[in-house]
Amino acid sequence: MSFQPEAIRAFERAGWQRAASSYGSSFAHATAPFVTPLLDAAEVSAGQHVLDVACGPGDLAAAAAGRGATAQGLDFSAEMVRIARSIHPEVVVTEGDAEDLPYPDGVFDVVLSSFGIHHVPRPELALAECERVLKPRARIAFTVWATPEENIAWSLVFDAIARHGNRSDAQAPPLGGALNQIDQCARALEAAGFVDRSAEIVRSEWLLPNGRALLAALSAGTARMAALLAAQEPSALASVADDIDSQAERFRCDQNLAIPIAAVLARGRKAGD
Ligand SMILES: C[S@@+](CC[C@H](N)C(=O)[O-])C[C@H]1O[C@@H](n2cnc3c(N)ncnc32)[C@H](O)[C@@H]1O
């Protein structure tokens, strides 16, 4: 299939619009542990003007504001924007697309993005836009999910679908760009003109009562994974749920499972004097 950025954008926007109302009680628990590493990587501090691209409900922008920064968020889902504005009134949230940021050149001290860049049809355009709106020598930091081998929450689902369902059933256009490894993220920053680049794996755990809760959180709070799950035959989905429920038990710590998750955290600086 030829590359169709508008099909990817429409699929992603519809998925995030649907997920928005349950995102805070589901998938946001997986992204939350990476907020502090992102703020630290970009050295966010009081007085800075910070932009959070693909902000979802705005928790990262709000955490930047908690450090004394003036924080703005941007997301292309009107529903995410509405929620972000209602729960974080201290953050100015704008509806817009990461490939076409509605800001002048050179206005931000820091641009952040938490698990957003890989959803954009052309991540390279989004990173070029981030570079454009940063002041000279200002910092960018972003996270994307690491490969399923590192991300057990994902591999539990993919392995169960491989055993009982069909991975190719998903009614989803392919991702715009592969962006789940250290070297890919470092190259993407380089292509957008950033200097002082580095990328690393950051690990955490997603606490959930059982494997079915993992399945429910991914179905309710994501776009692409939810589409893959929804596309499975009902009988296959029941077997997938049983499989995840039993396989996930090896991560049990008392009341909860502590399921390993991992991000690539990439950072760089805009060139300048
Ligand atoms: C996994 S959520 C991450 C939300 C939040 N940053 C977090 O870490 O919890 C992905 C977000 O990216 C947004 N998004 C995806 N593609 C986008 C685009 N092209 N422009 C702006 N936002 C986009 C979605 O609407 C969604 O809110």
Image (cartoon, rainbow, N blue to C red):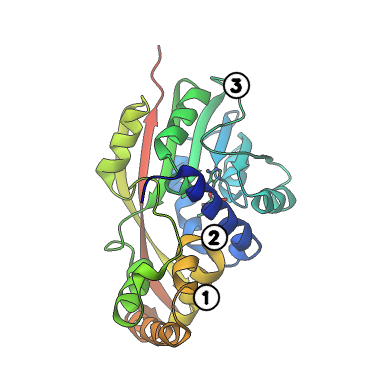
Of the residues under marks 3 and 2, which one precedes in the sequence?
2
Is 90 displayed left or right of 125 in the figure?
Answer: right
Query: How far separated are the C-alphas under marks 1 and 2?
Result: 13 Å
Of the residues under marks 1 and 3, which one precedes in the sequence?
3
Q: Above or below — where is 254 with respect to 119?
A: below
The amino acid on which the numbered mark 2 sits, given as a three-letter code, is Ala
Beta carbon of the mark 3 residue lies under 8 A of ligand 1: no
Residue carrying label 3: 104
Q: Which mark is residue 85?
A: none
Which residue corresponds to the image point at 35% horizontal and 68% vertical from the top-left? Answer: 168
Q: Secondary structure at mark 3?
A: loop
Q: 48 or 17: nearer the eye?
A: 17
Residue carrying label 2: 28
Q: Above or below — where is 158 with respect to 74?
A: below
Which residue corresponds to the image point at 48% horizontal and 30% vertical from the top-left? Answer: 130
Q: Secondary structure at mark 2?
A: helix
Q: 50 or 100: nearer the eye?
A: 100
Beta carbon of the mark 2 residue lies under 8 A of ligand 1: yes
Q: Residue furthest top?
A: 273
Quadrant into which the C terminus falls: top left
Badge nearest the viewer, 3 or 2: 3
Residue carrying label 1: 216
Q: 173 or 52: nearer the eye?
A: 173
Q: Is residue 210 visible?
A: no
Q: At which x and y percent is residue 110?
A: 51, 31
Q: Secondary structure at mark 1?
A: helix
Of the residues under marks 1 and 2, which one precedes in the sequence?
2
Which residue corresponds to the image point at 60% horizontal and 67% vertical from the top-left? Answer: 25
Q: At which x and y percent is residue 133?
A: 53, 25
Query: How far separated are the C-alphas under marks 3 and 2?
Result: 30 Å
Which residue corresponds to the image point at 65% horizontal and 52% vertical from the top-left? Answer: 80
